[in-house]
Amino acid sequence: MPDAVRPSEERSTRTERRKARTRASLVRAGQQLIAQGRTSVAILEITQLADVGMGSFYNHFESKEELFDAAVDDALERHGALMDELTADLDDAAEAFAQSFRLTGRLHRAYPELSKVLISTGARLVTSKRGLTPRALRDIARGVETGRFTMVDPEIALVLAGGSALALGQLLHDHPERDDAKTTDETTEALLRTFGLAAEEAAEICSRPLPEVTVSLDGSAA
């Protein structure tokens, strides 16, 4: 039959799926260790946490550092893609930026493990080519182009947003008594005002209802 899958192709497909599962398990283990602040562990401990053989590690990564970089990139990209999905129907760049920032701020408290992986990027977050950074820059630039934002340099606006996102996450971890939603929305309002929106409009945008979302560590919708 012309549409039948040849045995060799089926075996190849199974092999590729198995490799993908192994790599995903290693990346997940890397993300757990980053969140726990345990990046100095031995590779053996990583493979034990991932429940894969020691040799499997070197089939995918040359070093722990390469694994941890991949773990951070994976979390950033998946989280960024999720924010894209949740703002896809928003035409206003100011609202799209605000919604992504407000949702991300809430994740710090609701999903601390994911939050700690994102915070671990530090200053790299502002220049990353993956995750929220290029998406935030896109929304900011669109806001400038459409006259929604009066700050003329999108990259400076991005620096302010990126620094605020990191500091906000750390603040919420360090002060569990703070209301995460209120603190996040006030931070978002301040950014929108800095970008050029009137205080009243910034407050109104940040009072709009948000979509409900449940995420896993890797940032994907559960």
Image: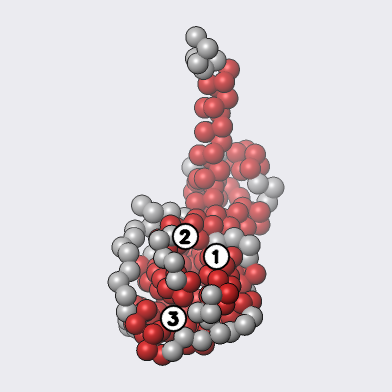
**Mark 2 secondary-structure assignment:** helix
Q: How crowded is mark 2: few (under 14 residues within 10 Å), some or many (20 or more)?
A: some
Q: Which amino acid does label 2 sit on?
A: Asp
Kindly check if marks 1 and 2 are in contact, taking CB atoms under 8 A apart as contact. yes
Q: Which of marks 2 and 3 is nearer the N terminus?
A: 2
Kindly check if marks 2 and 3 are in contact, taking CB atoms under 8 A apart as contact. no
Measuring 36% from the left and 52% from the top, which residue is drawn there? Answer: 222
Q: What residue type is labelled 1?
A: Arg
Q: Quadrant of residue 200?
A: bottom left
Q: Earlier in the sequence, mark 1 or mark 2?
A: 2
**Mark 1 secondary-structure assignment:** helix
Residue 84's label in the rendered image is 2
Residue 188's label in the rendered image is 3
Measuring 44% from the left and 71% from the top, which residue is drawn there? Answer: 92
Q: What residue type is labelled 3?
A: Thr
Between the residue at mark 3 and the residue at mark 1, the CA separation in whole angstroms equals: 16 Å
Please state which of residues 200 and 13 is positioned toward the viewer in this rendering. Answer: 200
Q: Residues within 10 Å of mark 1 (few under 14, many from 20)?
A: some
Q: Residues within 10 Å of mark 3 (few under 14, many from 20)?
A: many
Q: Mark 1 points at which residue?
A: 135
Q: In which quarter of the image is residue 70?
A: bottom right
Question: How is colour applied across the structure in the image?
Answer: secondary structure
Q: Which of marks 3 and 1 is nearer the N terminus?
A: 1
189 up-or-down from 217: above or below: below
Between the residue at mark 2 and the residue at mark 3, the CA separation in whole angstroms equals: 18 Å
